[in-house]
Image: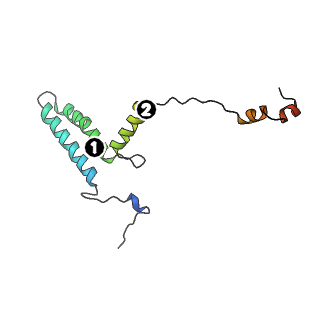
Amino acid sequence: MEVRVNKEVRNYQEGLFFGLSLRQLVFALLAVGVAVGVYFALRGLLGTGEIGWVCVLAAFPFAIAGFFQYNGMTFERFVLAMICSQLLTPARLVFRVDNLYAKILAHSSVKEALNID
């Protein structure tokens, strides 16, 4: 019998149902709920094939949000960080040269010894 142990203990995720964490399970159920709702809302308006695609497209954001992780951030924290960094506090970075050697040399006697203009 073999017991698997993660190399990094902080990366451990407890599997609740079919190996999914509670967060993943909730978002998967939410995606299924959205797909079923879209199906019943559109079944009189569209054909079966079109409804299938619309259901998949409507459920995709919810399904991906449960499994998304970027630099240890969940989907909500990632979106909040992107909004804060890109929309609320956009910074225009300007490159300015600051030649410390030239400043030091301008005030020293080495400049006169080297005959530098």
* Foreground of the two, 15 or 10: 10
Which residue occupies 16% across, 40% down?
36
Quadrant of the image containing the C terminus: top right
Locate residue 37 relative to residue 117 in the image: left or right: left
* Foreground of the two, 106 or 46: 106
Give amino acid for label 1: Ala
How many other residues sit within 10 Å of disc 1, few (<14), some (14-19) or many (≥20)?
Answer: many
Quadrant of the image containing the N terminus: bottom left
Which residue occupies 67% across, 32% down?
98
Q: Residue 38: which disc? A: none
Residue extending farthest left: 44
Q: Position of residue 86 (x, y in %)?
A: 42, 32
Residue extending farthest bottom: 1
Numbered circles on residues, count: 2
Classify mark 2: helix, strand or loop.
Answer: loop
Residue corresponding to mark 2: 89
Between disc 2 and disc 1, the foreground one is 2
Locate residue 41 relative to residue 10 in the image: left or right: left
Classify mark 1: helix, strand or loop.
Answer: helix
Locate residue 37 relative to residue 81 in the image: left or right: left
Which residue occupies 38% across, 34% down?
83
Image quarter of residue 89: top left
Residue corresponding to mark 1: 63
User: What colour scheme governs how the chains and residues are painted in the rendered image of this protein?
Assistant: rainbow
Which residue occupies 78% across, 34% down?
105
Give amino acid for label 2: Thr
Of marks 2 and 1, which one's residue comes earlier in the chain? 1
- Tell me if residue 13 comes above or below residue 31 in the rendering: below
Q: Position of residue 72 (x, y in %)?
A: 40, 49
- The span from disc 2 to disc 1 (Cα, nearest Å) is 30 Å
Image quarter of residue 53: top left
Q: Position of residue 97 (x, y in %)?
A: 66, 31
